[in-house]
Image (tube, rainbow, N blue to C red):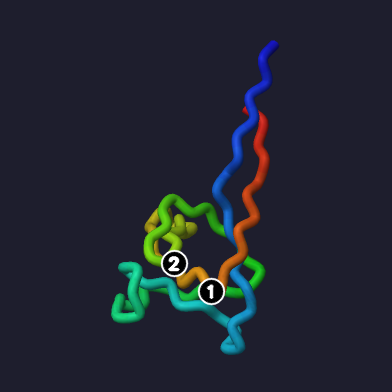
Amino acid sequence: DIIMEKKLATLRILPTGLGYLNVRDNPSLKGEVVIKVIPDETYTYIDEKDGWYKIILPDEKTGWVFGEYVEIVNIDITL
């Protein structure tokens, strides 16, 4: 049997001082806030641009978080 392992691109929200992190509709501070996420929550990310990460939200929508407030914690999964 061949066991395939894959890293799931995952990040964890870091403390911000506010108790939440804004998720925006594009990778810019000018982007509209679509939701707030809480420190220590983890999300799969699917893109990175200019220090911002595009995450998948629980409702299958996506949004961007600023990279200064996230920690990459890629998870090993066995297929």
* Residue that extends furthest to the top in the rendered view of this protein: 1
Q: With 13 as the anchor, is 3 left or right in this view? A: right
10 Å crowding of disc 1: few (<14), some (14-19), many (20+):
few
Q: Is the N terminus in the top left, top right, bottom left or bottom right quadrant?
A: top right
Circle 2 SS class: loop
Residue at horizontal 62 percent and vertical 73 percent from the top: 14
Q: As rendered, which of 71 and 61 lies closer to the eye?
A: 71
In the rendered image, residue 69, in percent from the top left (x then y), is placed at: 56, 74
Give the amino acid at mark 2.
Gly
Indicate the quadrant where residue 24 lies.
Answer: bottom left
Relative height, residue 17 to residue 25 (above, below): below
**Residue at horizontal 50 percent and vertical 69 percent from the top:** 67
Left or right relative to 50: residue 67: right
Q: Label 2, on which residue?
A: 51
Q: Amino acid at mark 1?
A: Glu
Q: Position of residue 51 (x, y in %)?
A: 44, 67
Residue holding disc 1: 68
Q: Residues within 10 Å of mark 2 (few under 14, many from 20)?
A: few
**In the depicted view, which residue is nearer to us: 7 or 36?**
7
Q: Residue furthest bottom?
A: 18
Residue found 30% across the figure and 76% down from its top: 31
